Amino acid sequence: MSDFLDTNIWASLLLSIIVIATSLLLRKWFTSHLFALVLSYTQSKKIHAASTVLVAFEKPMRWVFVVIGMQLAFQFLPFQTVSAAWESSLVRSCFIALLTWGLFNLSNVTTLLFPKLMTKLDINVDKIIIPFLTKMLKTLVFLFGFSIIAQEWGFNINGFIAGLGLGGLAFALAAKETVSNLFGGIVLITEKPFTIGDWIKTPSVEGTIEDITFRSTKVRTFAQALVTVPNSTLANEPIINWSKMGKRQVSFYLKLDILTKTEKLHMTISDIKALLQHHQDVHPETILVSFESMSDTSADILIYFFTKATDYLGYLQTKEDINFQIISILEKRNVLFSVPKSAVYLESAEQEHNKEPMKRLMSHG
């Protein structure tokens, strides 16, 4: 009789192991064959929504087989390892966790789906809002799953929330900075002083916007360092958004030799103005070329215009091309740049110094 019981125990244990092993094999088969087949079908038929959901729930669905196998294995065990209620709560918690995992993964793809939906609905939404909404959705999904699992194990969520209400003042004081940063992030999103990819400058940082979260904004500086600025700080600072420029200013003085004849000055100014008016990369709205002032060594020509390019490289290329053409105009008109008095004096002194040996040689002769 004892041998018979031992045989039944070992048979039950073996059956439980077989059930677990089968669930693991089904998990692998599901991933390699069934899931790949269904995903390939939805992609070939361009059913993008179904493909997105399948990809998000791929890993959770693999573990469904393991949970089912675990539940069946409990039934075949020759002895009771856990109570029926505990087993039921464990299995339900696993399924809730897998569902939460899938929804959490699905919230990641809202970054891709949201712009497409807005395009179809002809709604213009700033792209900085999308990652912010994605993070908020992830947080809600996590809290929702956590609260259901907690209730499944008998925790009183309502009591916990009430406890938070009683300790609300202490919590508010402890989380003052966090709440301030959260509202700062909301201000930045609603007022939209910048978006992802914009080049901004503030008293705290200058660089390109990479991301915005509940607490902070990440800015990539031109030295390629990543700076994390609290939203509350950024929301209370003046923000210069260089990317919002429709054109970019260029202003400088061209200092010409004061001895340049009036006629040549008139022709030089006219040539430079014509150059700027016909240059394809110069904004035609505001072009100023004027003989503004003079000193005892220079005639100062103000050159003021805007480039169409607002990015730094395009801005520099336009300035460089115009500078070379201005030099060509001066060479054509035989107009010289102004030379400071100190340079003239030094040149004269050097010439006198070079003449001294010749004078001494002539006096000896």
Image (cartoon, rainbow, N blue to C red):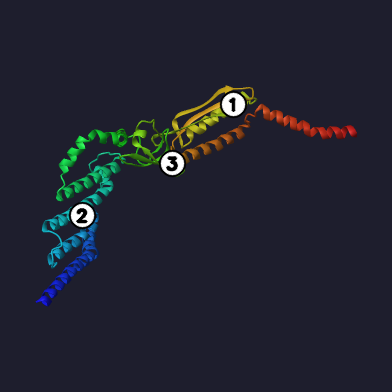
Among numbered discs 1 and 2, the one appearing first in the sequence? 2
Among numbered discs 3 and 2, the one appearing first in the sequence? 2
Q: CA distance from mark 3 to mark 1?
A: 44 Å
User: Which of the 4 image quadrants contains residue 334?
Assistant: top right
Q: CA distance from mark 3 to mark 2?
A: 40 Å
User: Which of the 4 image quadrants contains residue 58?
Assistant: bottom left
Q: Nearer the viewer, residue 108 or 358?
A: 108
x, y (%) of residue 326? 56, 34
Residue in view at x 11 percent, y 58 percent: 84
The residue positioned farthest toward the left in the image shown: 1
The residue under label 1 is 265
Kind of residue at badge 1: Leu
Does 120 appear above or below 64?
Answer: above
Q: Which mark is residue 221?
A: 3
Q: Is residue 47 left or right of residue 286?
A: left
Kind of residue at badge 3: Thr
Locate the N terminus by quadrant.
Answer: bottom left
Does 142 appear above or below 355?
Answer: below
